[in-house]
Image (spheres, helix red, strand yellow):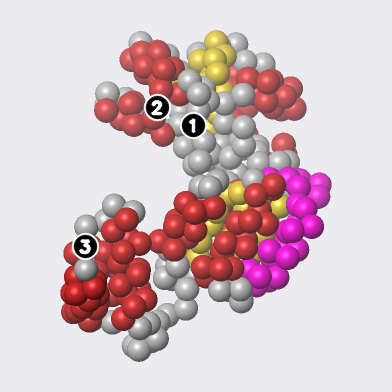
Amino acid sequence: MLAGTPIGDLADAPPRLAAELERADVVAAEDTRRLRRLTQGLGVHTTGRVVSYFEGNESARTPELVEALEQGRRVLLVTDAGMPSVSDPGYRLVAAAVEKDIKVTAVPGPSAVLTALALSGLPVDRFCFEGFLPRKAGERLGRLREVEGERRTLVYFEAPHRLDDTLAAMAEVFGADRRAAVCRELTKTYEEVKRGGLGELAAWAAEGVRGEITVVVEGAPAARPGDVDAEELVRRVRVREEAGERRKEAIAAVAAEAGVPKREVFDAVVAAKNAAQKVL
């Protein structure tokens, strides 16, 4: 069983969380010290075996937990905050349990993704969660360029010491005026939601920001025919191909983003290839 834990305020813990912590035969925790603080705050006592389950031992410990499940034991997985599997340990265990036809269920709990999205003031009807961006500048720019035409609202996690660089990169790729919201310390005493254009937010973050950070970015505006020139269409296809997409799928995706026929993108790619061969 997966169990969501508070992302800040202990009062947000679902009532079932305390009951499941007490009933579990095995509690797998991302940080056993954080688990101890959680149980003390909730006034509950775990009687089952407590084991660590984090990124460093997730692969090695998963078979052990699956074996416990096969023996009929009640295994509860919790992470430091929010729902397991969402940028946290849990996916491997769920996948392994499903493969063994073991029932997996969850105690729903707080989510930084949904909380930030709801508070952002940006469209919430369609969104996509992108997790953490790469730490290296070049890889970060590449990942952002993959979604520069994405029309859904984008949600990211980020470390406070990298926030200014990330917002600056977003401003470079998405445009300084693209609306965004930086949600800091959600549900905690010093909760703050800073809204504005990406350029403005990057300048604000350069002064230093602390705490747990979730960034919500407005999706790209709907493209109009003629808005994107042939050179840009080719560049977008190249970015997708470098990310591992087949050319056919990349062309279709870029055409959908730009609001132009697939044939137009295909012709642009072929023309660019022919021009490059002439130069050689």
Secondary structure type for disc 1: loop
Q: CA distance from mark 2 to mark 1?
A: 8 Å
271 on left or right of 182: left
Q: Are marks 2 and 1 in contact (CB under 8 Å)?
A: yes
Nearest the camera: 66 or 105? 66
Which quadrant of the view contains residue 93? top left
Picture coordinates of residue 257 (x, y %)? 35, 73
Pointer 2: residues within 10 angstroms few (<14), some, or many (20+)? Answer: many
SS under mark 2:
helix
| Quadrant, the C terminus | bottom left
Q: Magenta stretch: give its range.
A: 187-212
Q: Residue at x 69, y 65 (%)?
A: 201
Marks 3, 2: nearer the viewer: 3
**Residue 89: which numbered mark, if any?**
1
How far apart are the two marked residues, 1 and 3, measured between alpha carbons? 33 Å
In the rendered image, residue 228 lying in the magenta stretch gets the answer no
SS class, disc 3: helix
Residue 23 seen in this snapshot: no
Q: Give the residue number, with chain letter if any, for mark 3.
A: 247
Q: Earlier in the sequence, mark 3 or mark 2?
A: 2
Comes first in the chain, label 1 or label 3 = 1
